[in-house]
Image (cartoon, rainbow, N blue to C red):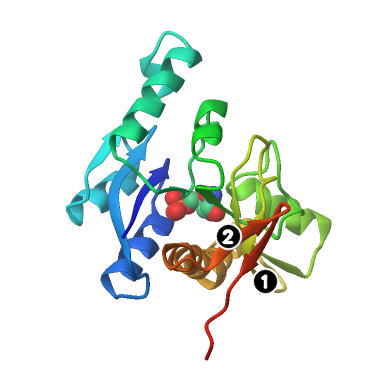
Amino acid sequence: MLNIVVLVSGGGTNLQAIIDAVEAGEITNTRISGVISNNKNAYALKRAQKHGIKSLCISPKDFGSRTEFNRNFLEAVDGLNPDLLVLAGFLVVIPPEMTERYRNRIINIHPSLIPSFCGTGYYGLKVHEAALLRGVKVVGATVHFVDEGTDTGPIILQRAVEVEQGDTPEVLQRRVMEQAEWKILPRAIDLIANGKVKVEDGVVKVVEDDN
Ligand code: GRF
């Protein structure tokens, strides 16, 4: 059984996709042992509570220094005994100690086809604004392992989404969520939970089903 802890900062639609997929049996061999947010008002916390999932809030604002936050954050995560950390719209930098301790056991969903429109400053709507400004015809989402960089870890799954005439950043964001994020994040968790994801020389190999 894969114990996962989901880290959130906002609305939690990706968390909801994970919860729904576990409850529907589309993600197997997995238990959501907790949800952590840095934002006490994150609707994602309410989604967790509605499903009886342990949730807690820990924010850098509650501590005198980032070092102190990092130590308490790591302690809170360890306390939930996770096998896998899932960043689902989590906007706080992961401390290097956590990346080290959970090497290739932290995954993130990013709303672009990495290496496009990613890295520092590319999050939320900004990603879609940049894509529309550049005039790309295809966007999408990426699930990747988290390393010391920003959106730089080994790529696990990607899914492409068409840009349509007249798209606004909000409309495009929603299509990317519906057609890509909410599909590939649960799928990535199910693959990991069933031992089908390996990292070899920084490249992910996914063992597809026989059928
Ligand atoms: C999503 O667009 C995700 O790609 C990005 O942050 C947003 C989180 O949305 N990392 P939600 O909180 O899952 O609704």
Q: Which amino acid does the dot numbered 1 rest on?
A: Ala
The picture places residue 105, in percent across and down from the top left corner, at: 50, 47
Chain-order first, disc 2 or disc 1: 1
Residue 85 in the figure: left or right of residue 75: right
Q: Could you say which is closer to the camera, residue 14 or residue 192?
A: 192
Residue 134 in the figure: left or right of residue 68: right
Could you give the CA–CA distance between mark 2 and mark 1, rounded to whole angstroms?
Answer: 13 Å
What residue did someone put label 2 on?
173
Image height check: is 173 above or below 126?
below
Question: Which residue is rendered at x = 26% and y = 51% of the image?
Answer: 48
Q: Residues within 10 Å of mark 2 (few under 14, many from 20)?
A: many
The picture places residue 162, in percent across and down from the top left corner, at: 69, 74
Question: Which residue is rendered at x = 69% and y = 36% of the image?
Answer: 120
Eye-nearest disc, 2 or 1: 1
Q: In which quarter of the image is residue 77?
A: top left
Q: Which amino acid does the dot numbered 2 rest on?
A: Gln
- Cβ atoms under marks 2 and 1 closer than 8 Å: no
The picture places residue 179, in percent across and down from the top left corner, at: 54, 73
Residue at the far bottom in the pictured view: 211
The picture places residue 86, in percent across and down from the top left corner, at: 45, 49
Q: Name the image quarter holding the N terminus.
A: bottom left
Q: Is mark 2 within 8 Å of ligand 1?
A: yes
Residue 95 in the figure: left or right of residue 153: left
Q: How crowded is mark 1: few (under 14 residues within 10 Å), some or many (20 or more)?
A: some
Image height check: is 143 above or below 41?
below
Q: In which quarter of the image is residue 164?
A: bottom right
- Which secondary structure, mark 1? strand
What residue did someone put label 1 on?
160
Image mark count: 2
Q: Could you say which is closer to the camera, residue 160 or residue 27?
A: 27
Question: Which residue is rendered at x = 42% and y = 8% of the image?
Answer: 64
